Amino acid sequence: MKNDIEQFKYQEPFRTPEGYFDDFTERVQKEIEVNSTPTSWIDRLNSFIPLRLAIPSLAVIMLCVIGMQLQDQYLFEGEYMINDTEIQAYLLQETETEDVMDWAVDEDFISSPVVLEEDIMDFLIEEEIDLETLQTYL
Amino acid sequence: MMEEQELIRLYFVEGRKNYAFNMMVRTYSERLYHSIRKILINHQDTDDALQNTFVKIWKALPTFKQDAQLYSWMYRIAINEALGLLRKQKKHKTVDHELTVERITNEPYFDGDLAYAAFLAAVSNLPEKQQLVFKMKYFDELKYHEIVDILGGSEGSLKASYHHAVKKIKEELELD
């Protein structure tokens, strides 16, 4: 035996079944016919696996979104929705600070209005109340 | 046997498409069969790959450039088809030399001796690129620039792959 891989070069050890090539052309023609038979749009859709998965997923997502919107509608329908900006605008336009403070005290949101020492001094100067007059109040 | 250019010219003649294609199948099927068979080993796999090859050829023929080499183009389609099947089979196939020899000798349409089966097993267990380069160069006697057209890469890297393949086969078979 020749001690080299060249010894195998021109051997053909594989054979085909008897008559394999006799009808091979016809088999290829049949295969081409099968491959070129028009398929329905459902078949074509089914063959596209990612689309088959995407369509149900998309339907579920859309149902969730529609469901959430309907839920929001029923929850808030008939209720008066009001936000912080609207409350602030109402208070500025329609009420005096004193009213708000009185309301806050009445509702126990704050214990009492905070009066600073300098506010007392300003009040006394503005009203021209001296110490003697003040003592008459006490 | 009709020449390549004559077959192509005939294919593009109105009404002769089927006849020309059938002539192509008759002319090249046996040659392509043996190229695919040396890659896939098994007859049934080779038959599937060969039929798929001709279906693809039929579909692609209308866009075939008439000045191109017909057989090289068909061969490229056949090798890619075989390669696709080989990759699918890869996870199920063993790389154990003795088991591969046994698988080859058990093939119903294998007439080679044990030495040839051992040689083919050594080739089949090479990494994919080395295996393909070796088979194209050794069995189908393709030039490196033709292999580049099919597998890509550079001639230098293909030469290196071929020499690595030869070295590994000789080591496996304990040849000089």
Image (tube, coloured by chain):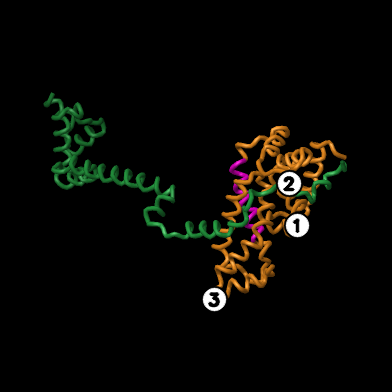
Chain colours: A green, B orange
Q: Which quarter of the figure has residue A63?
A: top left
Quarter of the image with the C terminus of chain A in it: top left
Observer-side mark, 1 or 3, equals: 3
Label 2 element class:
loop
Q: Which residue is mark 2?
A: A13
* Above or below for B50 versus A103: below
Residue furthest top in the image: A138
> Which residue appears at 19% of the width and 29% of the height?
A109
Q: CA distance from mark 1 to mark 3?
A: 34 Å
Q: Residues within 10 Å of mark 1 (few under 14, many from 20)?
A: some
Q: Residues within 10 Å of mark 3 (few under 14, many from 20)?
A: few
In this rendering, do the residues under marks 3 and 2 share a single chain? Answer: no
Q: Which residue is mark 3?
A: B14
Identify which amino acid the numbered label 2 is placed on.
Pro
In this rendering, do the residues under marks 1 and 2 share a single chain? Answer: no
Q: Kindly identify which chain the residue marked by label 1 belongs to.
A: B
Q: Main secondary structure of the magenta part?
A: helix
* Residue placed most toward the observer, A51 or B32: B32
Label 1 element class:
loop
> Which residue appears at 69% of the width and 39% of the height?
B104
Label 3 element class:
loop
Quarter of the image with the N terminus of chain A in it: top right
Q: Which residues are magenta?
A: B74-89
Identify which amino acid the numbered label 3 is placed on.
Glu
* Above or below for A95 versus B12: above
Q: Which quarter of the figure has residue B7?
A: bottom right
Q: Which residue is mark 1?
A: B142
* Above or below for A37 versus B66: above
State yes or no: residue A99 in magenta: no
> Which residue appears at 22% of the width and 44% of the height?
A70
Q: Residue B38 location, x and y as percent?
A: 70, 48
- Residue A60's disc is none
